[in-house]
Image (cartoon, rainbow, N blue to C red):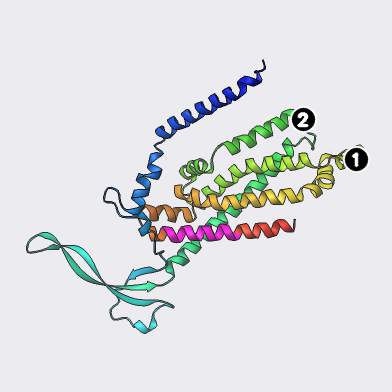
Amino acid sequence: MSVPASFRPFLFALGTVLMLALLAFSAQRMDLGRISTSAANILTGQSDNRPAIADQFWPLQLETREEWTARSADTANLPAFTHIETQIVQERQLDPETLRTVTANVHRTSLVHPFGYALDVAAKMLESIEIAIWGTLLAVCLGLPLALLRASAIGLPAPIRSASRMICAALRAVPELLVALILVAAIGFGPPAGILALGFHAAGFLGRFFADAMEDADQKPVGALRATGAGRLVTFAMAIVPQVRGPFASSTLYILDRNVRMAAVIGIVGAGGIGQELKGRIDMYDYGHVTTIVIAIFIVVLALDEIAVRLRRHT
């Protein structure tokens, strides 16, 4: 049933008003007012006598300190780039006479590694990159067979194609974080759980991307080879692969870029990499260390994006 043209502006206005009303109701349920009020006050230290969180994120932390107890050691033979530093810090101590805690100034001597924490973050970031690379390789190994099974260009029966599509959809449906949480409980903490979580989830995407690329390929060479009696594998290798190498490479680079970012996230639940360090520093309110980690993640993602752009130009 068609709506008269004279009523369409009224219906559009009514729909707009209803949508705005629903958004207003949802905003109240989601407590969005805190984004512009309480959150801003907390960041600037103007709410509930809390310290300004924004101030605690700077300066970023690059050094590490070790308690120096070797008083008689030769300070001329310290490790490279390190130095001894003595600070006066305030500590709470028990007064033996009054049996009350008092604040006392204590001299604390430390061995300072100027870039010790930066090197620790670099090592953890390298671990995250390795997790992402292995996860991407696993995704390619799983996604390519799934794509071959679901692509109509290969000519497999419809039930097999439908089953492959459902498997790809199931792999995409479960977020990496949830998969990582389950795998950490099943096989323990560390990179293996992260690799499997990223690989399984990304395989669903690559299965679809690769299949779509094969569907978009020109089917004339496929038909010509089939007319000569060529088998499915020969047809795939000779008629489809030359057309889909570029899309395959582009999709794989996208998944790698995505996995590098997600490797930092799944580490929060114990799946290895920089995410574990990030979670630990947040729990200890070491926001200067958090800033260092976030900057490291940003630099790595930016560098990988530039590398991906250059590689796409040659595919």
Residue furthest left as drawn? 97
Quarter that holds the C terminus: bottom right
User: What residue did someone put label 2 on?
Assistant: 157
**Magenta span of residues:** 290-303
Is 17 left or right of 45, judged from the image as shown? right
Query: In this rendering, does residue 249 appear at all?
Result: yes
Residue 8, given in percent of the width and then of the height, sits at 62, 23
Residue 299, given in percent of the width and then of the height, sits at 54, 61
Residue at 34% x, 77% y is 84
Quarter that holds the N terminus: top right
Task: Rate crowding at label 2 as few (under 14), some (14 to 19) or many (20 or more) other CA atoms within 10 Å.
Answer: few
The residue type indicated by label 2 comes to: Pro
Q: Earlier in the sequence, mark 2 or mark 1?
A: 2
The residue type indicated by label 1 comes to: Ala
**Decide: marks 2, 1 in contact (CB < 8 A)?**
no
The answer to whether 45 is drawn above or below residue 122 in the figure is above
Task: Rate crowding at label 1 as few (under 14), some (14 to 19) or many (20 or more) other CA atoms within 10 Å.
Answer: few
Residue at 60% x, 38% y is 172
Query: In this rendering, does residue 284 appear at all?
Result: no
Residue 180, given in percent of the width and then of the height, sits at 50, 44
The numbered disc on residue 224 is 1
